[in-house]
Amino acid sequence: MFSSKEFDELYFYSGNDLGANYSKEKTIFKVWAPTASEAKLVIYSKWDDKQGNELVMKREDKGVWSYTLDGDQHGTIYTYKVKIGDNWNEAVDPYAKTVTVNGDKGVVVDLSRTNPEKWNPKSKPQFKNPVDAVIYELHIRDLSVHPNSGIKNKGKFLGLAETGTKTNNGTPTGLDYIKSLGVTHIELLPMYDFASIDETSTKPQFNWGYDPKNYNAPEGSYSTDAYNPMSRVSELKTMVQTLHDNDLRVIMDVVYNHMYSAEASNFEKLVPGYFFRKDASGKLTNGSGCGNDVASERSMARKFIVESVVYWAKEYNIDGFRFDLMGLLDVETMNTIRAELDKIDPSILIIGEGWNLSTALDDSLKANQKNATKMPRIAHFNDTIRDGIKGSVFNHNEPGFVNGSTASQFKVMSGIVGGINYSSGITTWGNIEPNQSVVYCEAHDNNTLYDKLKFTNPNATEDEIKAMHKLAGAIVLTSQGIPFLHAGQEFMRTKQGNDNSYNASDEINRLDWDRKDKNIDVVEYYKGLIELRKNHPAFRMPTAEMIKNILHS
């Protein structure tokens, strides 16, 4: 029923005003709940109130319900209640722009009041061609929690906005250090509101954040005051502005392919059965491995994803988006996002994990590597060169080119040419352009490069490991395409062999600034490679035709 043209004709809502539409004179609330027989707006006085003032919403066209509150509602706490059959479901507004502690209620916000003093959304670091990027992947908490980081706002957005921070040895840390590397973009692991951290607790907690709860609100544990709904917004903006002021662009890691829990999600409570895919037996599909897959191909799900991305790009001045498990989304959704972002700023990057995953979506529609030619100017992580360089991420003991396998050379070569259809023996995904290939050998997932080398070469000396490590970095940073580094890779980061540290301790996940000082020679080597790449256009050719004409094997 939900996938039918008839349902779309009856209930697809094309308006751009879902959510709480604020002005000083009034706020208009709109929620899409076409299968509800009644709907209410619930207003609360405090974040932990159990009962609120229930206001009957008016049914409008296309399954939309609305209510208008007069006066300045900045800071007003609210939810929606909808009657589905005989049951009343309460849900946070999926479009909520900020939320109470732990994201259990939405909050109306006058976004102009959250802008930092020097907020300048028109001022961005100069950037044009995707292959000119050097991406540095970072978890906000990892950056600052080490005792020798010299950063005051440990684990917070503002920690990445601090300058002048140093180790006890007097060497740069944090933002100053990242800037000194010469990278162009910082890619931040999820910073929307996620479910796995208790924002009311003062105990150390860690999670990567791939468990979305409220897509359009920042994560409260990264703010200095999770109880103040405005802090998370203003402090994230302060971080973005500071990075821009320091000539660094910002890529946001987004997870629209699944949610923390389908059953507990706001979408499922408002429109049961619509937003998540099911197989022929009626069970939720689980290509994500997290219990559910978002049905991006349905028009109102696609609409939400596109509008959410556009909101982050406009309101927070975000410069790029990294799509987690992008292969679970559909081609049309990704191309629509690309088109909408082009209207804002064509230099905004889109990269994603184009893995081919099992879900209830026709193979021809999946936004994966096999369909890369259908999605121009959308880049995919190149696992061919990743595994070619160091060996399979799924087999700890399998070597790659830098650690003992001569059989991996063609995998490496296919990445060096930017993943393009270079020749019969050197190709990956067909007739793509180099701006569609993200070249890397280490990311937050799986073992760090250093740990992988220790597994594959247990008898190697530290100097031998270092030589392999440097060779891997040299391949990545001199390949065609878009190079990508995991934070700390440049000082041989270790996670003590943990290949899935999504909820491990700070001790496993944090950037070890003492290790940076210890391996400063490797840092300098990586800096030199980045400088070499920037200074020589031969390493970042913009078209497949140019690569085929100029690069010879």
Image (cartoon, helix red, strand yellow):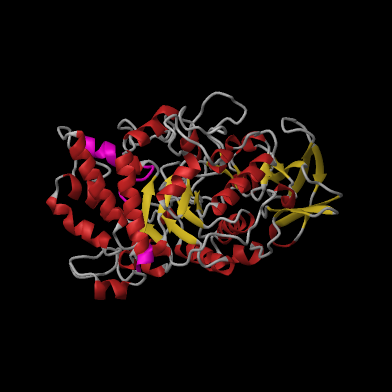
Q: In terms of depth relative to the viewer, which is nearer, 227 or 64?
A: 227
Coordinates of residue 228 in the picture (x, y in percent): 70, 36
Q: The magenta stretch spans which residues?
A: 433-455
86 sits left or right of 197 in the view:
right
- The quadrant the N terminus occupies is bottom right
Q: Is residue 46 left or right of residue 322?
A: right
Q: How many marks?
A: 0
Per the image, is 515 magenta?
no
230 or 297: nearer the eye? Answer: 230
Name the foreground residue: 44 vs 363: 44
Residue 498 visible in the displayed image:
yes
Q: Residue furthest left?
A: 406
Does residue 452 belong to the magenta stretch? yes
**Residue 127 relative to residue 109: left or right:** left
Quick one: quadrant of the C terminus? bottom left
> Which residue is depicted at the point 50% across and 60% down?
297
